[in-house]
Image (spheres, rainbow, N blue to C red):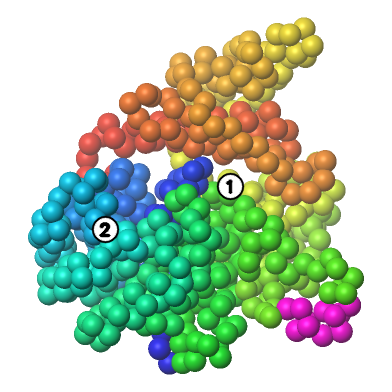
Amino acid sequence: MEMVKIFDTTLRDGEQSPGASMTIEEKVKVAKQLEKLRVDIIEAGFAAASPGDFEAIYNIAKEVRDSTICSLARAVEKDIKKAADAIAPAKLKRIHTFIATSPIHMKYKLRMSPDEVIKKAVRAVEYAKTFVDDIEFSCEDAGRSEMSFLKEIIDAVIKAGAKTINIPDTVGYRFPHEMGAMIKELVEYFPKDITFSVHCHNDLGLATANSLYSVLNGARQVECTINGLGERAGNAALEEIVMAIKVRRDLFDGIDTRINTREIYPTSRLVASVTGIEPQPNKAIVGRNAFAHESGIHQDGVLKHKETYEIMSAEDIGLDVKDTIVLGKHSGRHALKKKLEALGFSNLSEEELNRVFERFKKLADKKKEIYDEDILAIMNEESDKTPKVYELISLQLSDCSDGMPSAAAKIKFEDKVYTDAAIGEGTIDAVFKVIDRISGINGRLMDYKVEAVSEGKDALAKVMVKVIFDENKPAVMGHGLSIDTMLASAKAYINALNNYLHMKDLLSKKISYKDSI
């Protein structure tokens, strides 16, 4: 049996989806679930991108033992050194370095000649080789590169020590038969001990098809993300690639992955919960409607024999459609524990379980029925370990019928509770302004998004904000959860403020990241 390695880049390329930023703690949590999914390689981030990315990679490298931990690095020595330092604690480690190889990128972005690009690529691989043995090299925009030049640069980096060669369709330009032909020519041209990989983007909706055609033509590593997250239209979706290989064994004869498919759905739900980006309802494999049948003809067929309309079972991906546990105000700790285990949270300590149970009971007093999405939202908030410099105690809003909406808040800071009020142009504006007044730090709201976590008029509101507190620093994300939308908004803004202060604290210390962890 030939194994196709699954290289998951949810924590790197996936996080580059607008609005998909994750905290360090959330990244570690997702990485541990990816390990449970049995992903071969986890691209944990881009170490040189920011102190937060470095710290996240370093923490993941300490926590994950069964998957290879990888950091991306440009073909620049300082990037490669950062990557090496970040993955240092990992049991299995890889440096992934890259440079653009298409004529358009070399001319307009790099402003380098082909010979200069080859020399830079070789130096990068040789330098990376001084830190780790497992080196991956990517020809950025390979989909629009000339085959003769690809062969030349690949030959050079293999001689320099690269063991995995990645062929990215960076702008989602190629069609499946073209990607297949490209991979076939390269696999036949180079030594058999070199692993060829693909990284396909979905600009034309062909990322999964391009990846599968590449596998059929000799690629033995696929780079992909959970739920297809990624730049622009996203990446090839891990769940689609893995299940296509599993379901169509007639085509992929003798080829398999080591993925534990029963962890696909829990992983998808975790990533959706952490990023706030839900898969579209009709998304293949993990969408809400993927195993739903509304047509009477379809329902009749499925009831008589599932395979009439289902080419795979929901149980194959870890979705228990027969789960009859309904949680509510009368549910006990044991029922909650069973539900948590079904959702992928099986290693909670007694203290953690008690804390979640307390929050669950408070929510159950306000809602008739607790949905899986409610539990996942609670678990997502519980996993946020960002220091709570500011903590919301209470929020009171005035009747805005007079045209002057105001908000009064009590906020805890350094064991003292501060009270203030503010008038805003709207209720949300007033809420954010009173937090600014109490903290003395003014934020500029860049994005605000609210969605219902589950069903019904008593659904939890999940609010996501993106705020700039310092014009010289990047925007930070904040998340808040409550049945009351205004309260969720206040929590999200304070969460963003705390994330900003945590990031600022890391930058101001200017000590080694290892010492700060």
- Decide which of 122, 480 is in the foreground and name it: 122
Q: Is residue 372 left or right of residue 97?
A: right
Query: Overall secondary structure of the magenta stretch?
Result: helix
Above/below status of 91 relative to 71: below
299 horizontally vs 53: left or right: right
Disc 2 on helix, strand or loop? loop
Residue drawn at x 54%, y 32% is: 447
Residue topped by disc 1? 276
Where residue 505 sits, quadrant-wise, is top left
Q: Can residue 301 be seen from the camera position used here?
A: yes
Q: Which residues are magenta?
A: 300-310
**Picture coordinates of residue 309 (x, y %)?**
76, 78
Number of numbered discs: 2
- Within-10-Å neighbours for mark 2: few <14, some 14–19, many 20+: many
Query: SS at mark 1?
Result: loop
In this view of the protein, which residue sits in the foreground, 456 or 417? 456
Q: Is residue 473 above or below residue 242?
A: above
Three-letter residue code for mark 1: Gly
User: Where residue 206 sits: x, y (%)?
Assistant: 51, 65
Residue 393 at x, y percent in the picture:
62, 27
Identify the residue at image location x=65%, y=41%.
462
The verdict on residue 432 being magenta is no
**What is the three-letter code of the residue carrying label 2?**
Ser
